[in-house]
Amino acid sequence: MLISFKERIREKLLLEKWKVGSSTDKPLTDNQIEELVINPPQLCDEPQLCESRHLSDNGCICMRSVFENENQFNQWKSAFENEFKKRLFVGVDISDIEI
């Protein structure tokens, strides 16, 4: 995948801005988190061809279009992982699992 220097710089700046957020950004509400856990955000149709995904991984334009900043993304990610673990270990006493 050939990505121009200009596009790399542009993506880097957009990603940095998203990671920092702004003073007006608010955390996701419980209702927003619940909705996003039930209906997770979708990546673009062909993530392997997405320049933004290649350069910014989870901070790609697809995620930046859903979450105002990285803190909101991390809120959702944590809630999603917790829900996944609850469903994965239904009926299992996790204290019995040896690490």
Image (cartoon, rainbow, N blue to C red):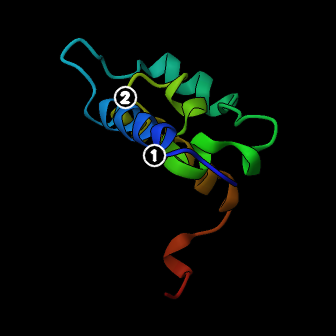
Q: Which residue is mark 2?
A: 69
Q: Which residue is mark 1?
A: 78
Look at the numbered disc 1 and give the secondary structure of its residue: helix
Q: Amino acid at mark 2?
A: Asn
With respect to residue 48, does 61 lie above or below? above
Residue 26 placement (x, y as % from top left): 30, 17
Residue under the image location 31 percent in, 30 percent down = 17
Q: Distance of mark 1 from mark 2, alpha carbons?
A: 15 Å
Residue 46 placement (x, y as % from top left): 80, 42
Q: Is residue 56 left or right of residue 9?
A: right
Badge 2 density bin: few <14, some 14–19, many ≥20, Cα 10 Å: many
71 or 31: nearer the viewer: 71
Q: Which numbered disc covers residue 19?
A: none
Residue under the image location 66 percent in, 33 percent down = 40
Q: Is residue 95 left or right of residue 24?
A: right
- Disc 1 versus disc 2: nearer the observer: 2
Disc 1 + disc 2, Cβ < 8 Å: no
Q: Amino acid at mark 1?
A: Ser
